[in-house]
Image: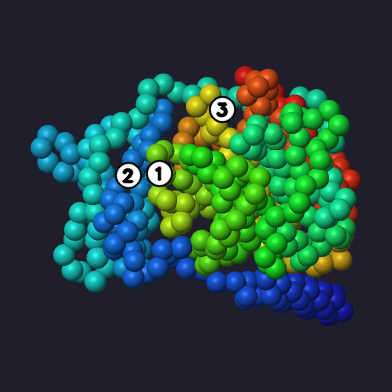
Amino acid sequence: MKKKRLWKTALIILASLLGLWLLLEFIMRWYVESPLKADFYGSIPRDAVQERQAQVGVQAASGPGWIHLGWIADPDSESYRIERQADGAWVEVGKTEFGSFLWQDDGTYRVLELPKNGSQSRILGEVSAAPEQGTPPTYVPAIGGAWQSLFKPEKFGYYINDHTVFQDAKGNWRLVGITSKTNGDYNQEKYFATAVSADFPPASGMTETEPVADFGELAWAPSVLKVGEIYRMFWSPHKLHQMKSPDGITWGEHQVTLTVPYHKFFRDGMVIQVAENQWLLYTTARGAYYSQVDIYQSFDLSGWQYIGAALRSGWGSERNSPFSSMESPFVTIYQGRYYLSLTYNNDSFFWPGVLMLFQIWPDRPSYNDTLVFHAENPYDFGVYRGRGNSPTLLTSLKTHAPEIVYNPATDSWYITTAGWPWVATLTHGEAAVAPLKWIKP
């Protein structure tokens, strides 16, 4: 009898602890999610979708072994059927809810809009596309030398976290990165520190210049892209900001081009061009539970729409924070193959988020855990199910929020690292740089 009472007491204690755990999980997730909004339409207003569909039609991008069809979508009220012409007839090859279809065969394609209210379908556009020949080789990126100090602000901030590195119109190298006059308080990160050097990497570091993007809102993870003769800078979180520059030095024309993303925890955006007048935006995101990297598509760098996940995670993935664990996505192309790096931070469950409020990171080396995935195309890097069960995972690198930088003058590759001073173990508030090697497996 006494033994039964002990078992009953133990079960009650266990159930109470489990209940408390679940309650704290719910409170944390509600706390971080409740202020955030999500939307199907990205930055294109609902009443402008059909006009934009007519303007854009169906656009094709391609590479070795793949083609991609893209268009403006209206997923609230339409789905889409993709057909390929064969022997004089149109044959269905797929359906989708968003303005994106990845395929592998050459041919002539058309996209039909299927209204969800049952009204007459219509053709959005027709396009011919063919994949390029060959299979891009696979290389494994590796840090090829010691870290060298690159830049630590002194006048306008005390550290560098997520950042970008690029060459301006004069050929000088520029760094733009997260900072604040704290030890790493993310709520105070509301402008970017900047620096310049004539060479990369510079022997004695970069020189601090005037800060940018000071608009009274959070300013995280800048990304700079040159389009024609115009430089464009993008940043987040929770919305997509943009500025333009004629030279990569002076910036203006600030605007918010995406106010409500498709998934919550939208941050750390990075933009690449995949074809003429076609761009992809990669962002940190989270689904119902699992972390992921989202893709948004644009045909003019102003109208953005969600088209899918570049990388999903599932059962077996080690980290799925309430505010997402796949941070700082960065896509590099090397010899025709695409490489997606992300810093795998923020452990699952409620307590890491609580501890971070007090600048406590129990496993400090994990702050520098960057995973690298590969794919033949820029749209699908597979599913992450843990380090031993993810075919597209190539390697992990000890670096935080890295940029992969190519210097054409020396035909050399480099990788950077940075981070909050209170947790980073590779640096002490500065951005640092090391050689990057591409190794044939």
> If you read the primary sequence from the N terminus, does the residue marked by circle 3 or circle 1 appear first?
1
Q: Secondary structure at mark 1?
A: loop
Amino acid bearing label 3:
Tyr
Which image quadrant for residue 200?
top right
Residue 387 can be seen in this image: no
Front residue (pair 186, 410): 410
Helix, strand or loop at mark 3:
strand
Q: What residue is rendered at 63% in x and 24% in y?
A: 408
Residue 6, given in percent of the width and then of the height, sits at 85, 76
Horizontal arrangement in the rendering, residue 67 relative to residue 425 (left or right): left
Q: Earlier in the sequence, mark 2 or mark 1?
A: 2
Circle on res. 277: 1
Q: Quick one: label 3, few (<14), some, or many (20+) residues within 10 Å?
A: some
Q: Amino acid at mark 2?
A: Gln
Q: Are marks 3 and 1 in contact (CB under 8 Å)?
A: no
Picture quadrant of residue 61: top left
In this image, 264 relative to 197: left or right? left
Q: Which residue is mark 3?
A: 334
The amino acid pointed to by label 1 is Asn
Q: Which residue is disc 2 drawn over?
A: 59
Q: Is residue 137 above or below residue 386?
A: above
- Where's residue 392, x and y in %? 56, 36
10 Å crowding of disc 1: few (<14), some (14-19), many (20+): few
Are discs 2 and 1 less than 8 Å apart at CB?
Answer: yes
Image spot of residue 110 (x, y percent):
23, 46
